[in-house]
Amino acid sequence: MINDRWFRLGDGYVTKQTRSEKKKCDTLVIGAGIAGICAAVAAARKGCNTILLSDRPVVGGNASSECRITINGVNKLDRSVPVERETGIVEELQIENWYYNPQESYPMFDHVLLDFVTKQKNLTVLLNTYACDVTVTDNSITEVIVRQLSTEKTFEIKAKSIIDSSGDGLIAALAGA
């Protein structure tokens, strides 16, 4: 599974990769866009030990300062109905942003989102971490192999349920679906 032969460019030495860790959780959410954040927070609030992966140094996906696509949802889809709005966790995110970020700064929104997920009980956030492989047993994904760029660490994560919010169906594709 994990490539244990690492080639060091500086001196040509081949060594074993020792920065690896096994983790277990109830729910693994891959992709920390708004949908992934909502899924992870909902799972954590239900008491599930949850891990949220972001392959970027920020959470928020397209709503982060990297893409700057605002959360609009159903707002004003039908102008004859003045009370249309997103509710639930998305509304909580927007209220936090209105309170802490009245200037509507995208870099500040990154901080609002990160604070929102990191203060959530039962939720661990791994930034700069991308899924790169899966283990399938009896037609079920039993483990996801992820790498964290900032620490060069590999995690083997066993999860009871896996939510793919990657935006491109990466986990299903890795599993052969």
Image (cartoon, rainbow, N blue to C red):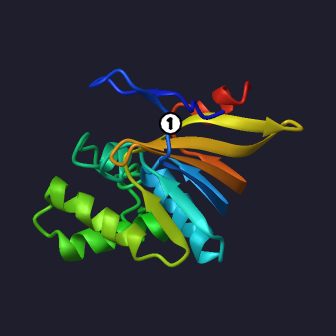
| Total labels drawn | 1
Task: Pick the residue in front: 42 or 121.
Answer: 121
Q: Residue at x 50, y 45 (%)?
A: 18
Residue 2 percent coordinates (x, y)? 60, 34
Q: Which amino acid does label 1 sit on?
A: Gly
Identify whether 112 is placed above or below 173: below
Specify whether residue 115 is in view: yes
Tell me the quarter of the picture where residue 95 sits: bottom left
Q: Is mark 1 on a helix, strand or loop?
A: loop
Q: Residue at x 52, y 69 (%)?
A: 123
Q: Which residue is drawn at 49% across and 66% down?
A: 124
* Farthest-out residue, right: 138
Tell me the quarter of the picture where residue 101 sits: bottom left
Q: Quadrant of the N terminus?
A: top right
Identify whether 38 is placed above or below 58: below
Identify whether 48 is placed above or below 86: below
Task: Pick the residue in front: 21 or 35.
Answer: 21
Task: Pick the residue in front: 56 or 84.
Answer: 56
Q: In which quarter of the image is the C terminus?
A: top right
Residue 89 percent coordinates (x, y)? 47, 68
Residue 99 percent coordinates (x, y)? 22, 77
In the rendered image, which residue does mark 1 sit on? 167
Task: Pick the residue in front: 81 or 69.
Answer: 69
Residue 76 percent coordinates (x, y)? 35, 54
Identify whether 66 is placed above or below 21: above
Specify whether residue 87 is in view: no
Relative to 169, is 13 on the left or the right?
left
Q: Which residue is drawn at 50% across and 61% down?
A: 38
Relative to 163, is 106 on the left or the right?
left
